[in-house]
Image (cartoon, helix red, strand yellow):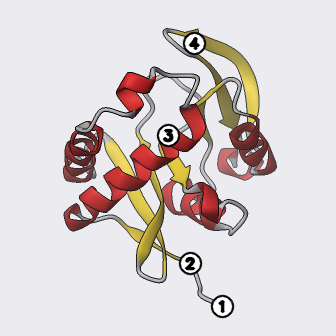
Amino acid sequence: MSEILVRSAVIPDAREMASVHVECWRETYRGLVHNQMLDDPHFVDRMEDFWISTIQRLGVETRAVAVAELNGKIIGIASSISPRDPHSPWVIEIDTLYVLSGSHGSGAGSLLLDAIIGDLDAALWVIDPNPRAQAFYRKNGFAPDGEVRNARIRAIRLVRRRESSHD
């Protein structure tokens, strides 16, 4: 049985990260976002640029970028950022966390979550409805705080507050 390896992302990972990101969007958001966007032949190229930029911003806006590998192939991606609201009670936000559907239940998501936020108070926005993701975050201590965004797609904010981080 192969073991999942989680490590910090580096720029040479950007293309494979982009492919995983796009595939996860296609698996998860088809029917919620326009097929034209999901099927755009340049979608992976744009996401590769996004990941290169995100990795380059490590230590500035970006707090952590990680990949999960199985047998040398990236199966999951994750990133965290400093809070968008400087007055927020959490210290970090999850910006991205995706695992290919064939690796759901493997533990890769939890390993990525630990790699990008550790035990810190954290928040994230999750598409609603997205019952699988919402269940994953609930299992990891997150709960809705009542905030909702309805730009093009409804999203709810989930927050995790650790008692130990307030000591």
- Let me know if residue 103 appears in the view: yes
The kind of residue tagged 4 is Arg
Residue picked out by circle 3: 26
- Cα distance in 3D space between marks 4 and 3: 21 Å
- Cα distance in 3D space between marks 3 and 1: 28 Å
Give the percent coordinates (x, y) of residue 132.
74, 42
- Residue located 67% across and 33% down the image: 159
Secondary structure found at label 2: loop
Mark 4 or 3: in front is 3
- Cα distance in 3D space between marks 3 and 2: 23 Å
Label 3 crowd bin: few (<14), some (14–19), many (20+), radius 10 Å: some
Label 4 crowd bin: few (<14), some (14–19), many (20+), radius 10 Å: some
- Residue located 73% across and 63% down the image: 105
The kind of residue tagged 2 is Ile
Secondary structure found at label 1: loop
Residue picked out by circle 4: 149
Count the marks: how many? 4
Give the percent coordinates (x, y) of residue 62.
33, 45
Task: Say which label, 3 or 2, has the lower sequence index.
Answer: 2
Residue picked out by circle 1: 1
Q: Is residue 124 above or below residue 72?
A: above
Whether the residues at callouts 4 and 3 have beta carbons within 8 Å, the answer is no
- Residue located 49% across and 9% down the image: 151
Task: Say which label, 4 or 3, has the lower sequence index.
Answer: 3
Position of residue 83 in the picture relative to residue 159 (left or right)? left
